[in-house]
Amino acid sequence: MEILSKKDFCALTINEFTEQLASKEPVPGGGGAAALVGALAAALGGMVANLTLDKPKYSAAKDEMQLLRAAIGRIQEELLALVEKDAEVFAPLAAAYRMAFDTEEDKAEKERVMQACLKRAALVPLEIMERCAEALPLIERLAEKGNVLAVSDAGCAAALSKAAIRAAWLNVCINVRIIKDESFVSETNTKGQDLLAKSILQADNIYNSVEAKLT
């Protein structure tokens, strides 16, 4: 299957996207899948907000639900954009791996290009982690104040956010491990590990709280 151009992946049907993901092509890959899962988590949060807004029983929470819906909808859009951005930054890296290295000049140029591409490829999944982490407090509030009939959806949103964050982190790791800029590696790893630790704890707390309400 042909590698699609920029901003095409989110226009695919679910079947087409998963077929492309399963193919031998380098994009979309784990980073794009992580961004999509994060977007699905945000969409579930939006669902909870919408199922709360039209119920008179929750009229006191209307203003807050509108704010939550808008905020999590923005994150959903940003994560879908990151599906495309992940493919956009990875394609040049895949091309860099195929660059000639017959001469010392070739080797130096290939190394220069690869190092630049690796940095860009590491920063996108880090951004995916940041957007998913940003969604979690919103999901937590929706689980607490949203329609009780949709509380399981809030729990699913937390579970998907956790999966997206963990998946994105692995995509950070695989790129930074061969970056030679030690300052960049240290800063990126610190940010990623901090996001991972805080977000996994928060996602688990939301999930466990929802599970406790349902069992």
Image (spheres, rainbow, N blue to C red):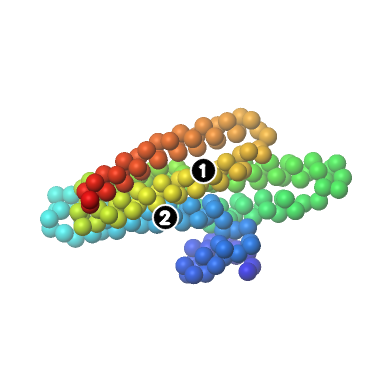
Residue 101 x/y as whole percent: 82, 47
Query: Left or right: where does residue 29 sit relative to residue 72?
Result: right
Residue 54 visible? The answer is: yes
Name the residue at 49% across, 63% down. Answer: 10
- Residue 47 occupies quadrant: bottom left
Q: How many residues crowd mark 1 within 10 Å: few (<14), some (14–19), many (20+)?
A: many
Secondary element under disc 1, as helix, strand or loop, is helix
Residue at 35% from the left image edge and 40% from the top image edge: 202
Viewer-side residue, 95 vs 149: 149
Foreground tag (1 vs 2)? 1
The relative height of residue 22 versus residue 154 in the rendered view (above or below) is below
Label at residue 169: 1
Cα distance, mark 1 to mark 2? 16 Å
x then y, percent, for residue 154: 29, 52
Compared with residue 189, is residue 82 higher up or lower down, i.e. above or below? below
Three-letter amino acid code of the residue under disc 2? Ala
Q: Residue at x 59, y 55 (%)?
A: 88
Which residue is the extreme one toward the left? 57
Q: Quadrant of residue 137?
A: top left
Specify few, some or many for label 2: CA neighbours under 10 Å numbering under 14, 14-19, or 20 or more: many
Residue 23 x %, y %: 60, 64
Q: Type of residue at label 1? A: Trp
Residue 85 can be seen, yes or no: no
> Residue at label 2?
39
Labels 1 and 2: the sequence-earlier one = 2
Q: Residue at x 63, y 61 (%)?
A: 25
| Nearest to the observer: residue 202 or residue 211 | 211
